[in-house]
Amino acid sequence: MSNARLDLVRGRVAVRLLALSLSMWAATAHAQSVSVALTPAAQLVDPGSVFELSITIQEAGLAFNGFDAVIGYDPAALTFLPLSPTSLQQGELMTGACSNTFHLFQAGAATDTITDVLLCNGVSVTGPGRIYRLRFRASNTPQVTEVHFLPGLQFYNDGLYVTPVSSSDAQIGIGMGLVDVGATPERKLELRIAPNPSPGGGTSFTIESDRAGVQQLAAYDLRGRLVRHFEDTTGSAGVRLVHWDGRDDSGHVLPPGVYLVSLRLEGRSVSRRVSILR
């Protein structure tokens, strides 16, 4: 075999090995997180019609036996319609794994708060599958609106928080066309925190995105209360670094503990937990 042909064969083998490595890396990364979405990601509905969204675990990932979620929407565009009994809102992934659950649902004017926990000893789930159902009635006004996850989304397993968690929202077109979100390429949004735990209270956030847009970054305590709102920044695609001194919006030093850092960008969100030590 000539040297040129041998080099060509070697090149093809190297490309195949690289593709296999990337595939294995991606599978490993997904298996080490929880990926949750409001589905379908985009849908067109008639004015005044009733439709459903699902909270769905997109693929097999980290195991969990409970979750909290806060769902936000525009009440001028959508009206939430609770099912009766509200236990019918629980998804098959949860009820199929355990018939004994702790389920708490609270409907608000523009938000719905959900807690759902499996109470069977040693039972947890990984997905994929539906964990919750949401039913809405559309307004009579043609428009495009959004249903989205608010800060407070968290998963846990046997009392321990499961991280990282990535989430994506849903777009609703009422009586009009909308972009087919499902046909767009996969979008990347990453949030990394270091050092974590933070021994002196100070830490840095590395934000990486493949899209430009307004980046909304905030920190919350574990009761869901906003403690620090970082300035909303119109960022370009790429990497951005944000430093946090461990203080709240009033400049007070926050007590040691665990805090939730949430990043939102164009209907996508990702959250991470950071431990502050003093």
Image: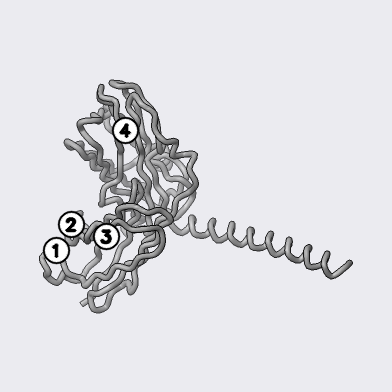
| Image location (x, y in percent) of residue 64 | 39, 52
Q: CA distance from mark 1 to mark 2?
A: 9 Å
Q: Secondary structure at mark 1?
A: loop
Residue, disc 3: 260
Q: Which mark is residue 249?
A: 1
**Inter-mark Cα distance, 3 to 2:** 9 Å
At 37% across and 36% down in the image, what residue appears?
54
What amino acid is found at the position of numbered circle 1 in the picture? Asp
Q: Secondary structure at mark 4?
A: strand
Q: Secondary structure at mark 3?
A: strand
Tell which circle, 4 or 2, labels the residue nearer the N-terminal end. Answer: 4
For mark 2, what is the residue? 226
Dot 3 amino acid type: Leu
Say which quarter of the image contains residue 17.
bottom right
Is residue 99 visible in this depiction of the protein? Answer: no
Kindly identify the amino acid type of the residue bearing the numbered disc 4.
Val
- Mark 4, residues whose alpha carbon is within 10 Å: few (<14), some, or many (≥20)? some
Instruction: Name, please, the residue furthest toward the right.
Output: 1
Circles 1 and 2, Cβ within 8 Å, touching? The answer is yes
Q: Secondary structure at mark 2?
A: strand
| Mark sitting earlier along the chain (3/4) | 4
- Give the residue at mark 4: 144
In-front residue for pair 14/55: 14
The residue shown at (28%, 72%) is: 203
Depth check, mark 1 against mark 2: the one in front is: 1
Q: On the picture, is 20 further left or further right than 95?
A: right
Colour approach in the figure: one colour
Query: Sequence-wise, which precedes: disc 1 or disc 2?
Result: 2
Disc 4/disc 1 C-alpha distance (Å)? 33 Å
> Which numbered disc, 4 or 1, marks the residue that appears first in the sequence?
4
**Could you say where residue 1 lies in the image, as x and y percent from the top left?**
89, 67
